[in-house]
Image: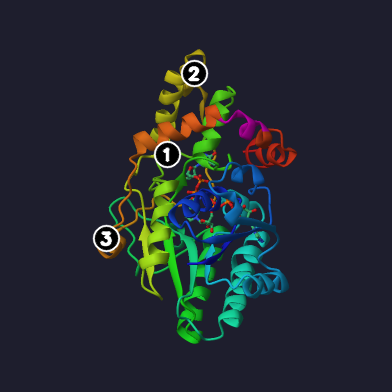
Amino acid sequence: MKNILITGGAGFIGANFVRYLLKAEPEARIYNLDALTYAGSLENLHDLPDPARHSFIQGDICDAELVGRLMTEHAIDTVIHFAAESHVDRSIHGPGAFVQTNVIGTFTLLEAARAAWAGEPSGRRFHHVSTDEVFGSLAPNDPAFIESTPYDPRSPYSASKAASDHLVRAYYHTYGLPVSITNCSNNYGPFQFPEKLIPLMVLNATLGKPLPIYGDGKQIRDWLYVEDHCEAIYLVVKNGKVGETYNVGGGNQPYNIDLVREICSILDELRPDGAPHTRLMTHVPDRPGHDRRYDMDITKIRAELGWVPRHDIESGLRATVEWYLENQDWVKSVLGDEGYTAWLEKNYAKR
Ligand code: NAD
Ligand code: TYD
């Protein structure tokens, strides 16, 4: 790992990963390609450790000329691909962007790596960051997803990620491209855009706004603190086997409604003037095609690479709530954005 192309490194997980990698790999140079969509921000990249080893390039992963040039000009040996449209609710309102970025964008990157590495896989790696949502929805007593669980995506988001996973594997089998994939459960932590459940609830609660619970709130996600995800990706890129997929999950599986209650109770302690924040919880009509439950079996990554999550949900959630309370400049820049207000209006006003 010398010259690393990170895509989507101004987004939530990508920005956390850039920080992680600058510390973990003291010699590496990072080229961070990000289109700065609504979900990406340079504010996520302030105060990097050793910023001189990080170069930001604003651009689209679907731009074949740009991506090809970056691969050769910087002698890229490692691609770690985060860039995506990532929000299920937005994929319901506008699936086109998901097919474009997640499918065509991944294809464009694969082609650029294939051309630049010209059948010489040694010392190279194309790592694709994917999601547990490709496996579909579990019933209450179903066993957790393993790497060979058949794909059964049910939202435009998960279908587009499934398509990208298939393309990545096809490039391994057909062209010998040295790929690896991680499929990870729901992340939370600093810099997550407040369209996703946890930051949305924290910010709405601090503003005294309703906390919208979809349906009965008995859906289950397998929550993982973002730093643990970064460590898993790093270990897979360094020591994981080429051509393999690794499931990554947090082992924390509360009902959504209980998770929101826990956020409220942390806020009651840290912001007692708004207590009890549970009074803001409001049931709203369910998300169409809402997956009921996800659960990741992490036996493979634990056995092969010794990875287990370091954070439990109690400590991770508290650290996350504190981060949003302490980083008011970041919060204000998001809340002040017209696009964000328009999204809240579109997704919640007529629910
Ligand atoms: P995010 O939405 O916060 O960030 C995505 C980033 O990609 C943004 O910075 C955006 O500007 C950039 N981007 C979007 N389209 C682009 C394009 N066409 N060209 C270049 N850049 C573009 O997403 P995230 O939550 O950080 O997720 C990162 C990756 O991890 C995604 O591939 C996602 O599917 C996967 N993942 C996310 C989670 C989660 O809980 N957030 C869980 C598992 C896997
Ligand atoms: P989200 O953070 O959007 O992630 P994903 O859909 O990828 O799992 O949602 C997490 C869970 O929270 C999911 O079951 C939907 C639910 N949810 C709500 O109940 N209300 C909301 O306002 C949001 C955004 C999500």
Residue 252: which quarter of the image?
A: top left
The amino acid marked with disc number 1 is Asn
Q: Earlier in the sequence, mark 2 or mark 1?
A: 1
Ligand 2 has an atom within 8 Å of the beta carbon of the residue at disc 1: yes
Q: Is residue 38 above or below residue 260?
A: below
Q: CA distance from mark 2 to mark 1?
A: 22 Å
Residue 137: % across, % down = 41, 56
Q: Is residue 16 above or below residue 214?
A: below
Residue 9 seen in render: no
Answer whether residue 319 is magenta in the image.
Answer: no
Instruction: Name the residue at 33% across, 49% down.
Output: 309
The amino acid marked with disc number 2 is Arg
Looking at the image, the residue that sits furthest to the left is 303
Q: Nearer the viewer, mark 2 or mark 1?
A: 2
Using a 10 Å C-alpha cutoff, classify the residue at mark 2 as few (fewer than 14 neighbours), some (14 to 19) or many (20 or more).
some
Residue 216: % across, % down = 44, 38
Residue 259: % across, % down = 40, 35
Residue at the disc numbered 3: 299
Q: Which mark is residue 110?
A: none
Q: How many marks?
A: 3
Magenta span covers which residues? Answer: 327-332
Secondary structure mostly seen in the magenta stretch:
helix
Q: CA distance from mark 1 to mark 3?
A: 25 Å
Which of the pair 178/299 is nearer the observer?
178
Residue at the disc numbered 1: 256
Residue at the disc numbered 2: 271
Residue 73: % across, % down = 66, 72
Q: Is residue 250 above or below residue 69?
A: above
Ligand 2 has an atom within 8 Å of the beta carbon of the residue at disc 2: no
Q: Are marks 2 and 3 in contact (CB under 8 Å)?
A: no
